Amino acid sequence: MNTFLSRLNTIFAFTLSVMAGLTFCCFLTTAFNEHKAPVYIGTGKAIVKNVPDYSATREKNDLGFVVFDMQADLSRIFNWNVKQLFLYLTAEYETKDHVLNQVVIWDKIIKRGENSVLDYRSSNTKYYFWDYGNGLKGNNNVTLTLSWNVIPNAGTLPKIRGEGSHKFKFPNEYSTNRL
Amino acid sequence: MAEVRHKGLNTPSSDNGQQSTSAQDFDGQKRAEKWFQIIIMVFGVVGFIWGYICQQFSQTMYILIAGFVISCFLTLPPWPVYRRKPLKWLKVKQEPESDSTNNATPSSGSSHKRRGK
C-alpha cells in the first residue's frame, strides 16, 4: 500500500473479489428457479421409408418423415442470469433391440431479448429421423418432447424437459414415392 | 502542494527533521485502503440492486467498474489528505570524521577475527 502500483494491485484484486461475490449472489437469486414451461406439440402426416443411409453403413435403414406443430411461451424462463436457451425436440421410441431410442430432430437457440414465444405450424424436421434398423415401420408409440438447456451467466446448466409431449405412430407400410 | 514536486525523493528535509515526500504516510495508507474498500463495496451493492431491478447483470458489472475507477482516482495518487501525519525522524547525527572512515573501511585482519568469534 506504500506505492501507487501496490495500491493499484490491491484495489484491482479487491474489485475482482467483489465481482466474484456479486456473481455468486446473482447465481443464488436464480438457483431455485424451476425453468419449466408448458409445451403443446402436435403432428401431421407421418411416413416412413426404407432407404440406404449413405452417411453411415449404406445399409437400408428406416427414415421417418413427420411434420409438427408446436406452441410454447418460454419468456418466463428468461431472467438476468439466463443468456440463452438451447431448445431441442427429441423423438423417443422403443425397438426390439433397444428399450429407449432418442433422436434429436429439431433444435433452436433463443438468445435473451429474441422472440421467445414459439408458434410453429406444419414445420419440417431440421435433422433426418434415422433409425439404425427397421424400428420405425409400424411403430405406434413415438413420443415427441421439447427439452431445453438453460445457459446462465453463472451457475449450473440445467436440462429441462418441457411439460407436455405428443405421441404418434408411423404407418405399417413403407412409402415409396418421392417426398 | 509544493511537496508533490519532490516525487520519488525519500530524503528527509532539512527543517525540523520531518519527512516530506510524495508518498502516502502510514496513516494515509490505512485510510486509503479503508476508503477504496468502502467505495467498491457500496458500488457493488448498489449495482447489484440496480441490476436486479432492471434484470441486467451487465449493469451490475458496469457500476462496479465505475466504483473501481472512482476509488482509483481517490486513493491511488498521494493526495495531501493522505500525507497529514508524516513520520518524525531524528535529526542526522553529526559524527567525527575519523570514526566514520575507520568504520567504513575495515581491514582484512578484522574480518578474520570476526569469523573466529
Image (cartoon, rainbow, N blue to C red):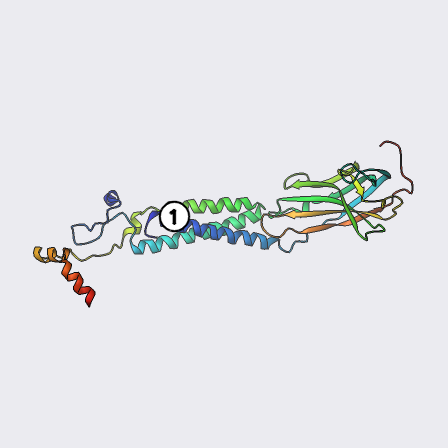
Tell me where residue B54 sits by quadrant. Answer: top right
Residue drawn at (37%, 50%), measured in percent from left and top?
A: A7
Q: Which residue does the numbered mark 1 point to in the structure image? A: A8
Residue B52 visible at all: yes
Is A114 positioned to the left or the right of A127 in the image? left
Label 1 SS? helix
Is B1 positioned to the left or the right of A9 in the image? left
Quarter placement of the C terminus of chain A: top right
Q: The residue under label 1 is which amino acid type?
A: Leu
* B107 vs B7, nearest the viewer: B107
| Residue A130: image location, x then y, percent | 80, 41
Is A79 positioned to the left or the right of B111 in the image? right
Is A153 positioned to the left or the right of A76 in the image? left
| Residue A79: image location, x then y, percent | 62, 47
Q: How many discs appear?
A: 1
Residue drawn at (28%, 51%), measured in percent from left and top?
A: B83
Residue drawn at (72%, 44%), measured in percent from left and top?
A: A88
For label 1, count other residues whose C-alpha is less than 10 Å away and answer few (under 14), some (14-19) or many (20+): some
| Residue B37: image location, x then y, percent | 42, 53
Return the chain for callout 1. A
Tell me where residue B107 sits by quadrant. Answer: bottom left
